[in-house]
């Protein structure tokens, strides 16, 4: 909508906020309130205002999956309340059982908390529901989780899928944080722990794939090909 355009493209936060407030006053839908909550959190750092807006969205529509999922992420990242976030993610998954977002987000929470088997199960649930014909950030996130915390037998395929998504299909995950999952992978003794943060930067789109050229495991994915991506 226009408020999102003003925020994301024009970076005119005052006009964007005014537009959000006008839209909510005219038609207080859960989606508008959810988007406004995200704006208040990410752009204004008004955490109390953001939480109030998420709660207002869920008062209007208690089964609004996007509001449930985004509020859960807010509770996890901004309030540090993993238990409340987990409950909210599970509500989101129940509200939209074919949407991979809640499963993927819950996977991160569980993996960061050391609940590896549960986290991997949530990754698998998310991957069941991704659209393989329209790959997106959720799929890339899931394969990153598998590479970090999945079993030894899964890593090569996970990395190959990351390569396919990032290099061949141009998928990136933006600002989504892998730091907690990487720390968990380090604690578990991941054999390629030193390359996880550079890999995460490539997956996020912050760095070109060429930063991984010195990594033998990554280079091995291109055996028989003429050149590495980004080189």
Image: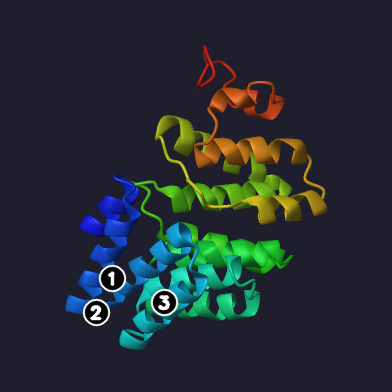
Q: Quadrant of residue 77?
A: bottom right
Of 122 and 66, the residue lying toward us: 66
Identify which residue is drawn at 69% across, 62% down: 112
Q: Please state, as top left, top right, bottom left or bottom right, where the N terminus lies in the image.
A: bottom left
Residue 148 seen in the current view: yes
Determine crowd level at label 3: few under 14, some 14-19, many 20+ residues with C-alpha closer than 10 A: many
Residue 176, percent from left and from top:
53, 52
The residue drawn where x is 53% and y is 14% is: 227
Identify the residue at the far left of this view.
26
Horizontal side, residue 5 vs residue 101: left or right: left
**Of the numbered discs in the image, which one, if any, rests on residue 114?**
none
Mark 2: secondary structure? loop
As rendered, which of 194 and 20 lies closer to the eye?
20
Is tag 2's residue or tag 3's residue first in the polypeptide sequence? 2
**Scheme by which the image is coloured:** rainbow
Tag 2 residue = 28
State the separation of the CA atoms marked 2 and 1: 7 Å
- At horizontal 71% and vertical 68% (from top left) the residue drawn is 115
Q: How far separated are the C-alphas under marks 1 and 3?
A: 10 Å
* Left or right: 89 in relation to 56: right
Q: CA gap, disc 2 to disc 3?
A: 12 Å
- Could you tell whether 192 is left or right of 43 in the image? right
Determine if residue 1 is in view.
Answer: no
Give the residue number, with chain letter if any, for mark 3.
Answer: 54
Q: Do the residues under discs 2 and 1 have CB atoms within 8 angstroms?
A: yes
| Residue corresponding to mark 1 | 32
């Amino acid at each position: 909508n226009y408020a999102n355009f003003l925020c994301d493209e024009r970076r005119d936060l005052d006009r964007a906020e005014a537009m959000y407030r006008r839209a909510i006053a005219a038609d207080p839908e859960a989606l508008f309130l959810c988007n406004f909550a995200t704006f208040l959190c990410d752009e204004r750092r008004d955490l109390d205002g953001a939480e109030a807006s998420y709660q207002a969205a869920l008062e209007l529509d208690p089964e609004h999956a996007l509001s449930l999922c985004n509020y859960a992420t807010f509770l996890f990242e901004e309030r540090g309340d993993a238990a409340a976030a987990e409950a909210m993610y599970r509500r989101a998954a129940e509200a939209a059982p074919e949407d991979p977002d809640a499963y993927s987000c819950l996977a991160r929470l569980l993996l960061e908390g050391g609940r590896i088997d549960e986290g991997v199960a949530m990754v698998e649930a998310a991957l069941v529901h991704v659209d393989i014909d329209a790959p997106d950030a959720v799929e890339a996130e899931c394969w990153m989780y598998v590479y970090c915390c999945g079993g030894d037998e899964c890593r090569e395929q996970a990395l190959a899928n990351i390569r396919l998504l990032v290099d061949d299909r141009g998928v990136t995950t933006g600002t989504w944080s892998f730091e907690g999952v990487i720390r968990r992978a380090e604690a578990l003794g991941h054999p390629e722990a030193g390359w996880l943060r550079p890999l995460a930067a490539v997956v996020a789109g912050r760095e070109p794939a060429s930063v991984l050229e010195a990594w033998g495991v990554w280079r091995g994915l291109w055996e028989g090909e003429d050149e590495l991506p980004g080189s």
